[in-house]
Image: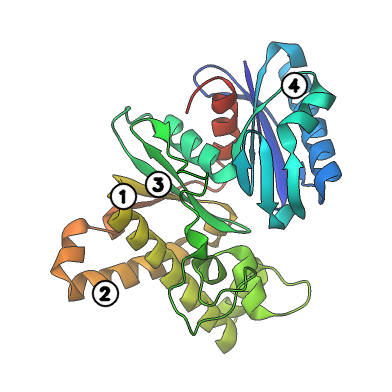
Amino acid sequence: MHLGIDIGGTKTDAVVVDAAGEVRARDRRPSGRGADEVVAVALESARAACDAAGVAPEDVTVGIGTPGTVVDGVVSHAVNLRVDRLDLAAEFAAGWGARPAVDNDVNVAALGAWILAGDGADRSMAYLNLGTGLAAGLVLGGKVWRGARGAAGEIGHISVDPAGPVGADGLPGGLETYASGSGLALQWAVDGATGRDVVAAAASGDPRAREICERAYYGLASCVRVLVLTLDVDEVVIGGGMTAWGADLMDGARGILGAWAGASPFLASLDLAGRMRPLGVDVPVASVGAAMLGGGRG
């Protein structure tokens, strides 16, 4: 049996899965903030998932997905968790008794989405996570592609408008600012508001909220365009909490992709809109991917 833990910007999601990736038990709870709380919540959720599955901690392999850059189990720049640097593998092992495999949360989500799709080893996939942040995980030839410094897929920092709104990283017009939950809330600039609040305000007719949502459609379309033009992956799977927005987000992005295809025969030939697929919002791909990573996959 394999235990996988997805430490997200808002929730920690632990699952116990079998060798095929089928979920046998699951525990979800709010994520901690700061290094000590992040580790404590991950341990609590892991123990609860094992209890629910009826397995002992020593009888499972362990994998963890986390925001930030991950090198040899050390997490850096996990801004949404208020973590500058954390040796997550060592700290978790101290409380668990065994060292986990640790990778970026979007990388493990890409692995989970690829495994659950069951499309074969030769199929390439980009998993685009639209959540608190925005990044892509890449599976090429059945393996997660991490890049030379673990930053492959960090497309949220790509600027699509040098005169656009300034994001949390200090750069203008970034894709994460355009199409993530934190980016929508940052543009909205209302204390305590979330991306969901912006979407609700737009649905109620607020013109500024609608403008922000239009930028989100453009941001999603731009992400798909960047990923296909860079890697020519078979498909771009869209996941993360922002997918709860529903058809409006996907249809808005498809409309922009269609306009680009109408203006460019080359882009039309790539069928960008046809290669974009939304994932069910409640499918725990990151947790499943983390579990399979701990079991030696990816």
Mark 2 Cα-neighbour bin, 10 Å: few <14, some 14–19, many ≥20:
few
Mark 2 or 1, nearer chain start: 1
Residue 183 located left or right of residue 82? left
Label 2 is placed on what type of residue? Ala
Q: Secondary structure at mark 3?
A: strand
The residue nearer to you, when weighing 271 against 222, is: 222
Q: Are marks 1 and 3 in contact (CB under 8 Å)?
A: yes
Mark 2 highlights which residue? 259
Mark 4 highlights which residue? 50
Residue 129 in view, yes or no:
no
Mark 4 or 3, nearer chain start: 4
Q: Secondary structure at mark 2?
A: helix
- Say above or below: 183 vs 244: below
Q: Are marks 3 and 2 in contact (CB under 8 Å)?
A: no
Q: Secondary structure at mark 1?
A: helix
Label 4 is placed on what type of residue? Cys
Question: Residue placed at 56% from the left, 74% from the top?
Answer: 171
Q: Are marks 1 and 4 in contact (CB under 8 Å)?
A: no
Question: Residue 41 at x, y = what percent?
Answer: 81, 39
Mark 1 Cα-neighbour bin, 10 Å: few <14, some 14–19, many ≥20:
few
In the displayed image of the protein, which residue is found farthest to the bottom? 207
Residue 146 located left or right of residue 290? left
Spatial separation of the CA atoms under disc 4 and disc 3: 30 Å
Mark 1 highlights which residue? 231
Label 1 is placed on what type of residue? Leu
Q: Secondary structure at mark 4?
A: helix
Between disc 1 and disc 3, the foreground one is 1
Question: Residue placed at 50% from the left, 46% from the top?
Answer: 280
- The quadrant the N terminus occupies is top right
